[in-house]
Image: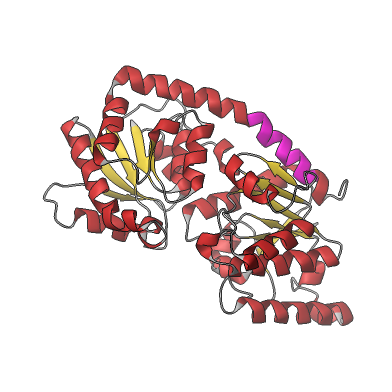
Amino acid sequence: MIFEIHGGQFKNKGAMKMLVTCIKQLEQRIPNVTFVVDGCVGNDQQLDSLNLKKLLFKRGWMGSKRFGLGFLIQRILAVLASLFPFLFKNAYTLNKIDGVIDVAGFAYTDQWGYKPSEDFAKLASYYHRKGKKVVMLPQAFGTFTQPKIINAIEKIINNTNLIYARDSSSFKHLTEISNNTDVLKRAPDITLFVKANSNENQIVSNTVAIIPNMRMLDQGSEFWKENYIPYLNMTIDTCIDNNLDPIFVIHDQAGEDIKVAQKALLERTDDIQVLQIDDPWELKSKLSTMQFVVGSRFHGLVAALSNNVPVISIGWSHKYAELLSDFGLSEFLISEQHGKKELSSLINVLTNESENKLKRDIVKVNFEKQRDTNKRMWNEVVEVLQGNCR
């Protein structure tokens, strides 16, 4: 069987982890499966490293200007390949694909505009008309207030076999458009249950990871655009006051988040390390040694929590609040309603050895609660992809 994986990429570590996890989990469950991606996902060396095949002709990212034309050309090539198969024997064209698996993470929302939702609606509709399977793995959805987005999401639901929201707010946003419970389900983030490299019996260090996110400055509220950098600096100061070693950990590969760290450190005289690790699994292992994490990258927080490391989240969307709620750490979300004193107070809590251990135990219990849901999700996905149910 041949499936397209849509929405993953190599520039963002979270998106890369979702891509890799999807491949590894389904390779274990579906014999002789082949995965293809659009050429925009990564270069040939990166694709070869995961044994990914490339669709003939680059469609481009959903939401991009070239998506519509690129998708049209792919569909034309699929028709030609059906008529003249000997000319396209070694090419991966749309007519050879058995379905699409979406791992976009957080693309279908007012915050990114209507275009990504409209583009994926076109892709889902194409595959559905051809009798192919369409599955959206756990991700954040919504809000949906723009008419164009609402129409696109309704179209997606009507043309998709399974859609997993990874939190209750996302599920609510979807069910407000359609209450099709045969399609709409809940499951945790798929990267939670992938072990870090050599994370057994890790010794907890005296280090606190600060994971910045450029989205706080270009997608966050006006409050965060003005106050995010001061909050990061206050985090550094409070950690130092508690005899902790704060470091910046960069969780993207596009070079955006390091600019946030550099901006925060611009006027500082202390020597704060900025850590960049290309391998997301090695990075996950590194985060497992932290005393705690203060972060704004969703999958950076996921990587810490999956290793029972407590976190403080400074987030720009509902997905951060929902993640902390799932792990029993709701009080460790810093929103624009919280001042610097409250952030400092939370850092002081996690500096306390007994409190830190208590939070680790809470995280571990909540992590285990989600394991069975994850297993059930993969079983449902495989049933659908193999054609054993709707």
Residue 62 can be seen, yes or no? no
Q: Residue at coordinates 78% horizontally, 60% vertically from top-left? A: 99
Q: Is residue 99 left or right of residue 330?
A: right
Residue 103's spot in the image, x, y percent? 62, 54
Q: Residue furthest left?
A: 269
Q: How is the image coloured?
A: secondary structure
**Residue 66, relative to residue 219: is it above or below?**
below
Q: Which one is nearer the viewer's eye here, 337 or 128?
A: 337
Residue 127 visible, this orientation:
yes
Count of labels in the image? 0
In the rendering, at what x and y percent does residue 129 appear? 84, 67
Q: Quadrant of residue 67?
A: bottom right
Residue 345 % position (x, y): 27, 31
On the rendered structure, is 268 left or right of 15? left
Q: Any magenta on residue 310?
A: no
Furthest toward the top, the residue is: 354
Q: Is residue 266 above or below residue 29?
A: below
Residue found at x 47% / y 34%: 305
Could you say which quadrant of the image residue 177 lies in?
bottom right
Image position of 299 with respect to 346: above or below: below
81 left or right of 260 in image: right
Q: Which range is magenta?
A: 371-382
Task: Identify which residue, 76 or 68, lies in the foreground.
Answer: 68
Image x and y of residue 359, in percent: 41, 24
Q: Give the overall secondary structure of the magenta segment.
A: helix
**Residue at (22%, 33%) from the top-left corner?**
244
The N terminus: image quadrant:
bottom right
